[in-house]
Amino acid sequence: MNLRQLVITVLLLSLSHSVSGGSVSLAGKTLDPPEFLPVDEAFLLTASKSGDSIQLHWLLQPGYYLYRKRFSFTGLEGLPEIPEGEQKHDEFFGDVEVYYDELVISIPFSGSSRQDSAKFTVEYQGCADAGLCYPVQSREFILNNL
């Protein structure tokens, strides 16, 4: 089998693997498809009040990351304090700043956002190193429930 035939065979095996969802056998080795966590397990988000700020805390599973430029915050007056992330080259988005393992964002609040029933919304997006990007996620919090 020449190189061209080998490449075509590997591509066909990959295609049949993605269509069938099963494992692929190549040169005696079985390649299983990656299993991805549900979004709320991959990116565990909690919120709490600390003095005059809201703390948003993400615990990320190994191999999962969040995009810095995909954060959005509505319903709070203060500007979020987002720490510096690490640089990564993304095949779709180019050079991006991301967060692995853990992330804490602090958002000061004052004035009308101190009301007992104030609500705020957090949007974020993350991916798995193994090749899956989740859609943008939106979570709503109520201040008096934190």
Image (cartoon, rainbow, N blue to C red):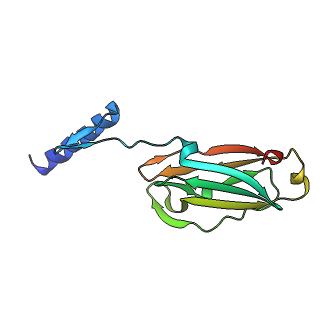
- In this view, the residue in front, 2 or 130, is 130
Measuring 32% from the left and 31% from the top, which residue is drawn there?
20
Image coordinates for residue 112, horizontal then vertical, percent: 90, 53
| Residue at far left of view | 1
Image coordinates for residue 48, horizontal then vertical, percent: 75, 53
In the rendered structure, the answer to whether residue 4 lies left or right of residue 99 reads left
Image coordinates for residue 103, horizontal then vertical, percent: 61, 60
Asked where in the image residue 140 lies, by quadrant, the reply is: top right
| Residue at far top of view | 20
Q: Is residue 135 visible?
A: no
Tally the numbered discs.
0
Measuring 46% from the left and 46% from the top, which residue is drawn there?
132
Measuring 62% from the left and 44% from the top, which residue is drawn there?
137
In the rendered structure, the answer to whether residue 67 lies left or right of residue 88 reads right
Measuring 58% from the left and 59% from the top, which residue is drawn there?
102
- In this view, the residue in front, 51 or 128, is 51
In the rendered structure, the answer to whether residue 67 lies left or right of residue 20 reads right
Image coordinates for residue 44, horizontal then vertical, percent: 60, 49
Asked where in the image residue 23 lies, by quadrant, the reply is: top left
In the rendered structure, the answer to whether residue 25 lies left or right of residue 46 reads left
| Image position of 126 with respect to 11: above or below | below
| Image position of 137 with respect to 57: above or below | above
Q: Is residue 59 visible?
A: yes
